Image (cartoon, rainbow, N blue to C red):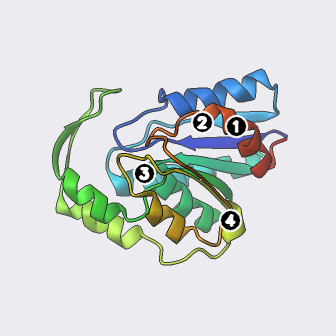
Amino acid sequence: MPALLIYIHGFLSSPLSIKAVEVQAFIKQQKLAVDVMTPQLSSYPGEAYQQLSMLITEQQQSYRQIVLVGSSMGGFYATLLAEKFGLKAVLVNPVVSPDKLMADYLGQHENPYTGQKFCLTDRHINELRDMSLETLTRPDNYWLMAQQGDETLDYRLAVGFYHHCPQLVEPAGSHRFDNFKNHLPDVMKFLELV
């Protein structure tokens, strides 16, 4: 029975994001017994979280293990899901306080990958606040990957929140996480897929 890796993309992103494609290509190239799912998430936080929760619930019987890789806002969702289901997760430049970050994104948006138009309101910010965690119950289940040159998020927030977890913090870099594919062997080892 194979394992399942769910790649969780960030806000205004898609399964076609560079890191998602790199994860799929690496697993195929290495011929790992791992299926990959990269769902296109709703742009609304509560809906995206429910979508992912339902996906994991539906897939649990079909796989020997389920693991998560989440980038940016996907890192926030991956953390919630790892807590709920007891899963291992790699978090790439994750959002830690999404209600504060997304307050700057109220109003109309268009996803550049899908063309979907949507409007974020105070209700969505409140959803994010209600979803946020105070602490982690199983810090060993998480590996934080952060780059200090992240132009979107303050990497120190993630370093602080995940301080009991294994961490890779690199100087410079970007929000995309430069040279992510070079770390994929270590990502797979942490997730116990090799």
* Residue labelled with disc 4: 86
Relative to 82, 161 lies left or right = left
Q: Percent x, y for residue 193?
A: 80, 43
Which class describes the residues within 10 Å of circle 2: few (<14), some (14-19), or many (20+)? some
Instruction: Kindly report the distance in space between the C-alpha atoms of the residues bearing marks 2 and 3.
Output: 17 Å
Query: In the rendering, which numbered label is found on residue 73?
Result: 3
**Front residue of this view, candidates 193 and 165:** 165
- Judged from the image, the secondary structure of the residue bearing numbered disc 1 is helix
* Residue labelled with disc 1: 184
Which badge, 4 or 1, is on the more N-terminal residue? Answer: 4
Query: In the rendering, which numbered label is found on residue 180?
Result: 2
Are dots 2 and 3 in contact, CB under 8 Å? no
Are dots 4 and 2 in contact, CB under 8 Å? no
Q: Which amino acid does label 4 sit on?
A: Gly
Locate residue 125: give its quadrant: bottom left
Which badge, 2 or 3, is on the more N-terminal residue? Answer: 3
Which class describes the residues within 10 Å of circle 3: few (<14), some (14-19), or many (20+)? many
Residue at 45% x, 41% y is 174
Q: Choose mark 4 or mark 1, whichever is in front.
A: 1
Relative to 50, 59 lies left or right = right
Instruction: Kindly report the distance in space between the C-alpha atoms of the residues bearing marks 1 and 2.
Output: 7 Å
**Front residue of this view, candidates 175 and 86:** 175
Which class describes the residues within 10 Å of circle 4: few (<14), some (14-19), or many (20+)? some
Are dots 1 and 2 in contact, CB under 8 Å? yes
Q: Choose mark 3 or mark 1, whichever is in front.
A: 1
Q: Percent x, y for residue 16?
A: 48, 26
- Judged from the image, the secondary structure of the residue bearing numbered disc 3 is helix
**Rendered view: 172 above or below 137:** above
Which badge, 3 or 1, is on the more N-terminal residue? Answer: 3
Residue at 68% x, 62% y is 166
Q: Percent x, y for residue 40?
A: 45, 36
**Front residue of this view, candidates 20 and 66:** 20
